[in-house]
């Protein structure tokens, strides 16, 4: 409970509200959206903002608001899946590598280095290219592309923790390998992974939109922001809102996740104090002593 | 901190990048003389060898002349042949060549030049989709200005085929390397190439041209790959006109946008048909009830109004009425979901949600290709929604141009969108290549195949003129009565031009530049 309170304190209300808003519409979107996001009505195509359709309709007469909401759901669902998959596998590899060290570490990390040296989007593109464009292929492709980052991160934390006196003591006390890894090393790494993941969510949301924009991710009729963008491009002049709305949603979500990640990172790992703050602290300290 | 700031940056640049996708560098627009016509090209002119399938048709058409010319409605007029006679048995075509014609390099046009050109491609496997190549017996030079072409069998399409752009046009026999390979675009046409770069092609009038001299003194073609950039160039007055399916296509949506920007839209009845084709080798579509149900689920009227912005006419015919022998118009059925459901029930496809038969769900895959068939993605999504109402699960598979040209002839699809060949190829080509089952599928694949219709097609393709209307009607009626294809619409041909153009005439085919009848 205290951890959550600390986190809330560190992140601040606006960011919490922003992220909370996206999660809320993603979870309850089905009940919130005024229309079926895939229901077409060609006779009501390309309507602008209005009472019947608040954000208008797209070129096939589908309700834009409903599709935006459904898009949030698709994106967040995708991001969560990828982070869970990449995080789990990455942490597993990282912990094994960090704990055992030696040649296991060498081999695993060289593979991971290779993975890191290729841009993740290129890896994802290649995998989708081979297995064909599909939502689940995209998720798996992105997860594979993101594994090295989390493996590297976890390995760093674990390798540093393994030589700490408390782990030594655990070993001396006869704790099993599994116990040390599961109960002590993984939690240590989990913190860093979560911080990184919160900032990474934005990048992933963008990548999902990218792949779908290129026709390699989410397939029609499922609503997704990147796909809404590409479908709306021919109507840029006539109905700019069809491009602006999904673009704006994506931008706000990405910025939200980045601010979240930045805030958490700052709270966990404060910046060194500035000179002014330092002098101020000293004066306070002297005053206290004088008193 | 660093990471997250960078990601914000990546985010914003990607977004703007996505929007700017496809925009090339700014093209070099011509310094316009008063009589220079500036037109856009979606891609560079490419190799203009008239015997290769590479260059842009409309440019080849400006440079190289045909034996005979195709004019609106399928009428054939003299070209490099001044007159011709056809033997009683329709097997020998004798052409009297036009005298005093020279290629732009000074080489004379005569029987020798004609035979040299025809020998380059007749009869060779790559060109046997043309009856004149497949049926060729021999080329006989009667005198320096008379050539007889003998065919092994009746070849009623010969005249139309000799009007095509490639490979049938004539190159100067001197415009080749020592080994006979193509060197430069030297023809007898009204225009000759002044400069040709990947950025654009400039053509100037051929002062030795045999026909009416062009009123323009230059045609400057500039490569603008992105449709949106072409629109802004047109709106800004950097180019004079745009259009042509294979030149720099203007979509119905673009036309609507341009119109509101004060650009004049010139349209002409389309010569082709957008068709939803069933894979004839799938068990599912061997059932006529299924084909009828699919046909009845399509709201053709709404597609034409909303998707095509009114620039299309709903149809149930294989050919629009501007195509010769296209026959009587069939009624376009209203969308009838209830009847379609009943038909599917009768065909054994039953159940709530996605229907199934013998445990197999009714899932079909629609292969779409935005770069091969423009607008096919939106059309696919509409069909997806319309079919799902009757319990048909439709998935879209989006492929690129090359993949489509691989998958379609190999029947790796359930349904797909096809466009008939249009003028000047039809009514012969679409029937002969895309429906006749004895012919190997070409890159466009097969609309349908059934041994039962083959004799009807064979008769239509070889019928003497008097019997053609009836023979073609028999094929059309068979296709219609058997619900063999699902025709959707005839799209209009769209050209857009700015104020600098005083008069404008949409060219007769999609393979020509709008030069005849234009005035600046």
Image: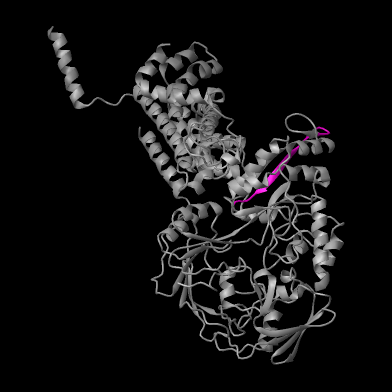
Image quadrant in which the N terminus of chain B is located: top left
Does the magenta portion include A161? no
Q: Is residue B391 toward the left or the right of residue B304 in the image? A: right
Specify the segment rendered in magenta: B357-370
Find residue A197 and report its horizontal and vertical position in percent.
46, 28
Does the magenta portion include B360? yes
Q: Is residue A290 toward the left or the right of residue A10 in the image? A: left
Query: Is B60 rendered above or below residue B394?
Result: below
Find residue B497 and report its horizontal and vertical position in percent.
48, 63
Find residue B14 and report its horizontal and vertical position in percent.
44, 43
Find residue B248 and report its horizontal and vertical position in percent.
53, 61
Task: Give the prevailing secondary structure in the magenta stretch.
Answer: strand
Q: Is residue B419 toward the left or the right of residue A202 in the image? A: right
Say which residue appears at 83% left-offset and 46% top-offset.
Answer: B288
Q: Closest to the observer: B504 or B40?
A: B504
Image quadrant in which the C terminus of chain B is located: bottom left
Q: Is residue B18 among the parts visible in the rendering?
A: yes
Q: Closest to the observer: B170 or A135?
A: B170
Q: Closest to the observer: B187 or B2?
A: B187
Residue lying at the far left in this picture: please name it: A290
Q: Is residue B437 among the parts visible in the rendering?
A: no
Say which residue appears at 86% left-offset and 57% top-offset.
Answer: B451
């Amino acid at each position: 409970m205290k951890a959550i309170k600390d986190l809330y304190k560190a992140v601040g209300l606006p960011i919490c509200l922003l992220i909370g808003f996206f999660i809320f519409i993603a979870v309850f979107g089905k009940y919130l959206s005024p229309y079926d996001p895939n229901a077409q009505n060609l006779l009501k195509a390309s309507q602008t903002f209005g009472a019947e359709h608040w954000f208008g309709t797209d070129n096939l007469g589908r309700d834009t608001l409903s599709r935006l909401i459904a898009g949030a759901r698709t994106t967040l669902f995708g991001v969560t899946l990828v982070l869970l998959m990449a995080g789990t596998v990455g942490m597993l590899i990282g912990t094994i590598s960090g704990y055992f060290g030696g040649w296991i570490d060498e081999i695993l990390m060289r593979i991971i280095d290779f993975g890191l040296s290729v841009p993740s989007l290129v890896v994802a593109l290649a995998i989708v290219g081979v297995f064909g464009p599909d939502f689940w292929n995209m998720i798996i492709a992105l997860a594979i592309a993101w594994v090295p980052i989390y493996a590297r991160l976890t390995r760093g934390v674990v390798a540093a923790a393994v030589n700490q006196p408390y782990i030594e003591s655990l070993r001396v006390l006869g704790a099993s390998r599994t116990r040390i890894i599961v109960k002590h090393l993984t939690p240590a790494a989990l913190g860093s992974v979560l911080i990184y993941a919160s900032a990474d969510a934005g990048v992933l949301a963008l990548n999902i939109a990218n792949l779908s924009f290129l026709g390699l991710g989410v397939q029609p009729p499922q609503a997704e922001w990147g796909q809404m963008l590409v479908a709306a491009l021919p109507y840029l002049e006539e109905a700019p809102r069809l491009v602006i709305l999904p673009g704006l949603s994506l931008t706000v979500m990405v910025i939200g996740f980045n601010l979240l990640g930045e805030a958490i990172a700052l709270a966990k790992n404060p910046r060194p104090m500035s000179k002014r703050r330092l002098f101020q602290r000293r004066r306070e300290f002297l005053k206290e002593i004088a008193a | 901190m660093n990471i997250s700031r960078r990601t914000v940056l990546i985010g914003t640049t990607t977004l703007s990048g996505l929007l700017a996708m496809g925009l090339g560098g700014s093209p070099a627009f011509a310094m316009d003389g008063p009589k220079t016509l500036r037109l856009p090209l979606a891609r560079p002119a490419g190799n203009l060898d008239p015997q290769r399938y590479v260059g842009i048709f409309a440019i080849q058409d400006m440079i190289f002349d045909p034996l005979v010319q195709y004019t609106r409605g399928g009428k054939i007029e003299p070209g490099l042949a001044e007159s011709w006679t056809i033997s009683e048995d329709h097997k020998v075509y004798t052409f009297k060549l036009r005298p005093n014609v020279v290629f732009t390099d000074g080489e004379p046009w005569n029987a020798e030049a004609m035979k040299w050109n025809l020998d380059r491609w007749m009869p060779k496997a790559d060109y046997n989709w043309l009856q004149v190549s497949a049926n060729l017996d021999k080329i006989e030079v009667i005198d320096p200005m008379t050539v007889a072409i003998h065919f092994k069998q009746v070849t009623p399409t010969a005249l139309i085929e000799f009007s095509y752009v490639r490979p049938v046009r004539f190159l100067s026999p001197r415009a080749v390397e020592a080994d006979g390979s193509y060197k430069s675009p030297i023809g007898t046409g009204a225009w000759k190439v002044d400069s040709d770069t990947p950025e654009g092609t400039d053509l100037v009038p051929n002062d030795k041209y045999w026909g009416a001299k062009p009123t323009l003194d230059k045609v400057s073609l500039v490569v603008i790959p992105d449709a949106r950039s072409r629109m802004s160039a047109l709106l800004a007055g950097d180019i004079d006109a745009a259009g042509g399916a294979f030149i720099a296509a203007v979509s119905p949506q673009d036309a609507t946008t341009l119109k509101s920007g004060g650009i004049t839209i010139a349209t002409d009845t389309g010569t082709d048909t957008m068709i939803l084709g069933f894979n004839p080798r799938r068990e599912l579509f061997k059932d006529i009830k299924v084909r009828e149900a699919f046909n009845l689920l399509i709201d053709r009227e709404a597609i034409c109004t909303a998707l095509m912005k009114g620039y299309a006419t709903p149809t149930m015919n294989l050919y629009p009425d501007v195509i010769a022998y296209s026959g009587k118009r069939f009624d376009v059925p209203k969308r009838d979901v209830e009847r379609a459901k009943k038909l599917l029930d009768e065909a054994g496809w039953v159940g709530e949600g996605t229907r199934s038969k013998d445990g197999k769900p009714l899932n079909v895959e629609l292969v779409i290709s935005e770069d091969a068939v423009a607008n096919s993605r939106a059309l696919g999504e509409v069909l997806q929604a319309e079919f799902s109402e009757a319990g048909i699960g439709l998935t879209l598979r989006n492929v690129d141009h090359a993949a489509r040209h691989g998958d379609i002839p190999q029947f790796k699809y359930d349904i797909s969108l096809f466009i008939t060949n249009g003028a000047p190829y039809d009514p012969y080509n679409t029937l002969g290549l895309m429906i006749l089952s004895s012919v190997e599928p070409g890159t466009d694949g097969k609309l349908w195949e059934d041994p039962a219709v083959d004799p009807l097609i064979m008769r239509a393709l070889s019928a003497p003129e008097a019997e053609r209307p009836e023979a073609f009607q028999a094929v059309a009626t068979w296709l219609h009565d058997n619900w063999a294809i699902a025709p959707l619409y005839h799209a209009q041909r769209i050209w857009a031009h700015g104020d600098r153009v005083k008069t404008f005439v949409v060219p007769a085919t999609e393979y020509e530049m709008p030069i005849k009848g234009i005035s600046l």
